[in-house]
């Protein structure tokens, strides 16, 4: 057995001294992130882990309510599993589509979204949930939220318009029109429905598109003032929303009224400690914390999995954000850069607003945690958007060669096993 400072037998046999044995340094680890498929695997891995964690936590957080309403603890998570089973193929399909196809879909997607947002405001068609008129019931248990799909439509529309005008963006008229008027129209329709959280995310997408298109920084001061004015308008025009904003500053001052949800969220996080009370052992899900499996699922994660689990979720979102901006920065196609950056901003801001509300540092706006919270209307557009990021990551420098060297993936191998052979794709 080699002593400390003495070369081991394998090193001696190879003729290498201990002094010359390479050490894995931080710089070497960082250089490993420069591999062609780094972005691809970061997006894929983080997305699947968040979706898987979401299913587990939806089961735990909704079990009491499910049993109360249906006599089965699985009724809510079964619906979420169906949405995941629809979302995974959708994510795979968009990951195989080209940037040209996304450009072609941009204008139809925007007009369909505008039609859906307008339909929500029609009496008898749109329905109000928790103070927001943003749902359309399609019959039975099926309901859709057009404002969620509008986020993806705005990404594709904005990236397409700005990329087409790439050489004209030094003129304000070409930079702003038609992107800003169309975006204002989308935001206005969402505001009429009273959805503050989605309004914030849509404004973040618009600002990301303009920022990465090279808009002068002085514009963002004006845009920030306008966006702040819109948010304040939404807050002051609805008493329940005003109570939400004021109660987050001190939820315990209105503990038995508007501060109840915020206070229970803090109780959940504080009781979790370092490692949590254990998966499935939440106390808050027993009717204390409203919306435990939707907007406040992060509080249940903190309670059951503790600080370790909470930070793990943050790390997965950080990986998604890093990969998304990496894809945007490495592409020479302006459409890809703008779409990747705005998708990343969408997911980052929505996660930030949701988690900030759970932690009590931001007002409660009623938006879900991407990929984790219950709800198909929110899940499917995000998974489609992540598929778009995967498509862009496949086109990064060296990625095609690396994918070809790796051989067919599990989906293609499964199709071949079933007898659906196809020519190899490079």
Image (cartoon, grey):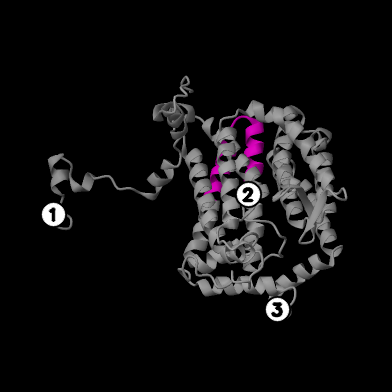
Q: Main secondary structure of the magenta part?
A: helix
In the figure, 31 relative to 267: above or below?
Answer: above
Q: Residue at x 66, y 64 (%)?
A: 291
Image position, residue 377 (x, y; %): 68, 48
Using the rendered view, name the quadrant where residue 235 is placed.
Answer: bottom right
Query: Which of 230/301 is in front?
Result: 301
Q: Which mark is residue 242?
A: none
Q: Residue at x 19, y 48 (%)?
A: 18
Q: Residue at x 52, y 57 (%)?
A: 313
Q: Report crowding for label 3: few under 14, some 14 to 19, many 20 or more residues within 10 A (C-alpha).
A: some
Viewer-side label of 3, 2: 3
Q: Which residues are magenta?
A: 318-344
Q: Earlier in the sequence, mark 1 or mark 2?
A: 1
The residue pinned by badge 2 equals 347
Q: Which mark is residue 2?
A: 1
The residue pinned by badge 3 equals 255
Left or right: 148 in relation to 115: left
Q: Is residue 111 visible?
A: yes
In the figure, 249 relative to 152: above or below?
Answer: below
Mark 1 secondary-structure assignment:
loop
Query: Which of 171/204 is in front?
Result: 204
Q: CA distance from mark 3 to mark 2?
A: 31 Å
Q: Is residue 424 magenta?
A: no
Mark 3 secondary-structure assignment:
loop
Q: Report crowding for label 1: few under 14, some 14 to 19, many 20 or more residues within 10 A (C-alpha).
A: few
Quarter of the image with the N terminus is bottom left
Q: CA distance from mark 1 to mark 2?
A: 51 Å
Q: Is residue 323 magenta?
A: yes
């Amino acid at each position: 057995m080699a002593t400390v400072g003495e070369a081991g037998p394998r090193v001696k046999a190879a003729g290498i001294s201990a002094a010359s044995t390479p050490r894995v340094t931080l710089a070497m680890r960082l250089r490993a992130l420069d591999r062609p498929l780094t972005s691809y695997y970061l997006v894929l891995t983080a997305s699947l882990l968040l979706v898987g964690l979401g299913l587990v936590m939806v089961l735990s957080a909704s079990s009491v309510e499910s049993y109360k309403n249906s006599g089965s603890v699985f009724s809510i998570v079964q619906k979420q599993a169906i949405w995941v089973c629809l979302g995974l193929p959708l994510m795979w399909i968009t990951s195989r589509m080209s940037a040209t196809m996304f450009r072609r879909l941009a204008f139809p997607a925007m007009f369909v979204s505008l039609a859906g947002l307008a339909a929500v405001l029609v009496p008898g068609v749109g329905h109000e949930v928790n103070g927001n008129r943003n749902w359309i019931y399609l019959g039975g248990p099926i309901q859709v939220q057009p404002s969620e799909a509008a986020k993806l439509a705005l990404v594709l529309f904005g990236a397409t318009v700005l990329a087409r005008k790439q050489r004209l963006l030094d003129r304000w008229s070409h930079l702003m029109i038609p992107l800003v008027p169309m975006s204002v129209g989308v935001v206005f329709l969402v505001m009429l429905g009273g959805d503050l959280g989605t309004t914030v995310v849509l404004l973040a997408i618009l600002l990301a598109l303009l920022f990465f298109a090279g808009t002068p920084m002085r514009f963002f001061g004006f845009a920030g003032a306008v966006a702040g004015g819109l948010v304040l308008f939404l807050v002051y025009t609805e008493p329940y929303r005003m109570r939400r904003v004021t109660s987050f500053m001190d939820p315990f001052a209105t503990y038995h009224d508007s501060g109840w949800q915020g206070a229970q969220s803090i109780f959940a996080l504080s009781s979790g400690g370092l490692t949590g009370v254990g998966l499935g052992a939440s106390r808050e899900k027993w009717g204390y914390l409203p919306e435990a499996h939707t907007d406040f699922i992060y509080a249940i994660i903190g309670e059951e999995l503790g600080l370790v689990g909470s930070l793990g979720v943050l790390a997965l979102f950080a990986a998604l954000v890093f990969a998304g901006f990496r894809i945007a920065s490495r592409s020479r196609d302006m459409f890809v850069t703008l779409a990747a950056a705005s998708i990343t901003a969408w997911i980052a801001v929505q996660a930030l607003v949701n988690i900030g509300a759970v932690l009590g540092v931001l007002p409660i706006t009623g938006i879900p945690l991407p990929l984790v919270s219950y709800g198909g209307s929110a899940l499917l557009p995000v998974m489609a958007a992540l598929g778009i990021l995967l498509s862009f990551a496949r086109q990064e420098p060296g990625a095609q060669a690396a994918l070809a060297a790796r051989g067919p993936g599990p989906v293609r191998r499964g199709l071949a096993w079933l007898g659906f052979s196809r020519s190899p794709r490079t």
